[in-house]
Image (tube, helix red, strand yellow):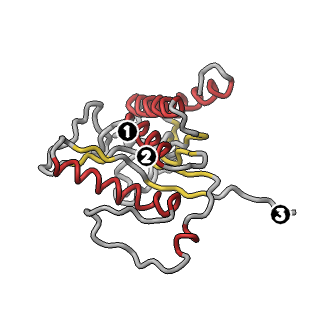
Amino acid sequence: ERVRCPLGIVLNQSNADAASHSAADVALARTQYASFVRWYMDPLFRGAYPQDPGIAHYPQIEAGDMVTIAQPLDFLGVNYYTRNWMSSTGEPAPMALGATDMGWEIHPQGLTELLVGLHREYALPPIFITENGIACADALQGGAVNDADRIDYVRRHLEALAAARAEGVDVRGYFYWSLLDNYEWDSGYAKRFGLVHVDYATQQRTPKASAFWYRDTAQAVRSGAVNA
């Protein structure tokens, strides 16, 4: 007997905010959104690449390419960490909630804005947040890691998801990145995203405070004690 597995795609996505109302910043933000989000979403859900004056090169399209690309999906996976802050003068992002150990702005509101925008622009399948997380300068002290910043980050982003769902976005699941501290593709072992601390010399695993908070929050949602 054949079993059909759900098939979808996972994309790194972020909204693009202009640093000011200047024509240059607005154009930068529009082109960034077109190249970072619409470049993938438009072929998948509209059967065409986005047309933007800031995009210099387009792929050669053969007959039937768009029909092949725009196949029905069972789900859309979204990886979100921060927004794109677009300034023609190099003005830095506000960092109102601080930054991660990667130097990325903490901006949970951007997740709401991204998802609501996608919901309005496209006929979407159910959405899963397949990556969302924060690198912290975690330190093992007394056999424990008190990563309060990670707990706050995840809580704020779950609240951002709740706000998106309240706007009608069909979000079905959330996956934190990552379970364990690991080798990051451009940072080696220097950055720690995990819910579980890894001593790379001994391979000792120690659940961080965030791991227990995450467990308890998931159990509370499952039991109905907390609304998802």
Q: Are marks 2 and 1 in contact (CB under 8 Å)?
A: yes
Asked if residue 79 lies left or right of residue 55, the reply is right
Residue at 43 percent across and 45 percent down: it is: 193
Give whichever of 222, 64 is nearer the camera.
Answer: 64
- For mark 2, what is the residue? 80
Residue placed farthest to the left in the image? 89
> Secondary structure beneath disc 3?
loop
Looking at the image, tell me whether mark 2 or mark 1 is earlier in sequence order: 2
Residue at 46 percent across and 59 percent down: it is: 42
Looking at the figure, which quarter contains the N terminus? bottom right
Asked if residue 199 lies left or right of residue 169, the reply is left
- For mark 1, what is the residue? 110
Quadrant in the rendering for residue 35: bottom left
Percent x, y for residue 129? 52, 44
Type of amino acid under label 2: Tyr
- For mark 3, what is the residue? 2
